Every structure is written in structure tokens, then in C-alpha cells.
Amino acid sequence: MHTYTDGRHEHGQNFLRDRRIIRRMIDLAAQTQGPILEIGPGRGALTFPLEELGRPVTAVETDRRLAQRLSRSCGRRTSVVHGDFLQHRLPEAPHTVVGNLPFHLTTAILRRLLHHQHWEQAVLITQWEVARRRAGVGGASMMTAQWAPYYSFELQARVPAQAYSPAPAVDGGILTVTRRQDPLLLWKQRRAYAGFVHRLFTGPGRGMAQILQRTQGLTRAEAGRRLGEAGIRASDLPKQLTAEQWVELFRRCGSGGGSNLSPRRGRRSRRPAR
């Protein structure tokens, strides 16, 4: 396997060097299918072992020097593209995303991916606390709750700071994101649903019953009934709700509710709302 240990710290990037973490990333990627789109290959710590999977790899690198160097060393099935991933045109065919994300760009990259309709699975290294929040460890974040009807998030492993060169100030985490084959809501409902989740996450109250009353204008009895129908306790907090509970509550309280929200009643839609 090719490894690089020299060079400068470019674009806020920390270069992965721990072979155990690299092996874990490759093992997870091997469980996916289709061409691979790699974010920020850097010196190729993941790129070269990804090539061994025998699948086409497109690696998008923002640093021209590193992109040129990596391109000279890669096999014929790997394409190294010099460019900003946030501006890169994503493939319009099913693919897998793999990347050791720059910590300061994690949220922006995740948002771009979540809005795109063609990739199926992502194997990513993010900042540890971001990986925990996205996977709902200790309670889901608002962003995770907003996207949970369409994706499942899972925390796979902790990545110690010493696994990088140079070492960052905090640990990383391996996060996998998988598109639901049967989404809990239609794509066309995404904006209305995301707005509903935002109102409840940011609304006043000590539990879901109070929050629901104050944000939805419901009486105490009405709020209690709808929470009960969704399997939610009055004292639960927004971060404690499952994806299924959020969806059921949205059906009963959110705008555009009703049976039309269920993709199981019709053909699956993969086109995201714009």
C-alpha cells in the first residue's frame, strides 16, 4: 500500500496514517456497491486500498499539488480530479461516497450529500462529536432528525487524534450513512417535514407536550392525544424521538399530513425537493 508521511499540512487537512483505521474504512466500503467517489484523498491513504476493491474510483482533491502527485501513482480505473468537492458535480448514477472529511467542512459536506439523490451509502470520518450527534448517541441532533426518514446514520468507531499526521486537537469518528430503500416520507414532503422538526426542536417547553401546545396551538388534551398516538411520552424531549415517532407526529400535526405522506402507497420517489 502506498503511504506518504512527508509534506505540509494543506487546507486544514489531517492525513490519515493509522493502518487499523484505514483497514476499517476499506472493510466498510467493501460492503457497499457501485463506483466510489472519494472526498479529499490527500496523499492516497484510502485511495490506494480502495483501488484494490476493483471498482472505479473518482477522487476529488482541493490541493493541486497533492492531486497531481496522486494522479501519477493511481491505477487506470482511478480518476483524480482537482477541485472543491462542494462545487464538484456529483454523479447521476448510484455510487458510494468515501472520505476523511476536513473537520471544519464536515457540516457543509454532509448537507450537500444529503440533498443529493443518487448515492446509496457513505463511509466518512468526521469529528468525533459530529459523528456521535449524527448517529443519535446521547440524543439526535435537529439535523439528524430532519433527515432520518430518508437516511440511517450509524457510528462505527472512534478515530484517535494520533491516527493522523499532523494530529488534530480532537478525535474523529467513522460514520456510515445509508439511504433508506423505503423512505418513511416522500421526498416532496422534505421541506415541510424539516420545518416541522425545526419548530419543535427550537420551541419553548420542558417536554413534547408543552412544546406541541405552544408551537402548534393545541390544547393540553389535543397534544396528549396526538403524542399518545405517535407513541411519545409528554415528558420526552425532541432529541429522544425516533425517526418513526417524528414521522407519525408529523402526519398528525404537520402541514400536508395524511396518507399521501407514505411512499408505501405509491411508487417510490427519489427526487429531492428543491
Image: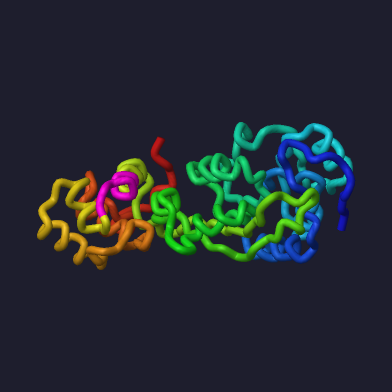
Task: Check the picture and name the quadrant holding the C terminus.
Answer: top left
Q: Is residue 69 above or below residue 167?
A: above
Q: Residue at x 59, y 54 (%)?
A: 122
Q: Position of residue 231 (x, y in %)?
A: 25, 67
222 on left or right of 13: left
Q: Residue at x 28, y 52 (%)?
A: 261
217 on left or right of 168: left
Q: Give the quarter of the image for residue 172.
A: bottom right
Task: Check the picture and name the quadrant holding the N terminus.
Answer: bottom right
Question: How many marks can you see?
Answer: 0
Q: Position of residue 215 (x, y in %)?
A: 22, 46
Residue 174 visible = yes
Depth check, front residue: 259 or 265:
259
Q: Is residue 4 above or below residue 12?
A: below
Depth check, front residue: 263 or 206:
206
56 on left or right of 197: right
Asked if residue 192 is among those painted magenta in the image, a careful observer would answer no
Residue 47 visible = no
Q: Position of residue 206 (x, y in %)?
A: 27, 56
> Which colour style is shown?
rainbow
Q: Residue at x 46, y 60 (%)?
A: 136
Q: Main secondary structure of the magenta part?
A: helix
Depth check, front residue: 35 or 43:
43
Q: Is residue 81 above or below residue 237?
A: above
Q: Residue at x 54, y 45 (%)?
A: 110
**Residues shaded magenta:** 198-205
Q: Position of residue 257 (x, y in %)?
A: 22, 50
Depth check, front residue: 212 or 250:
212
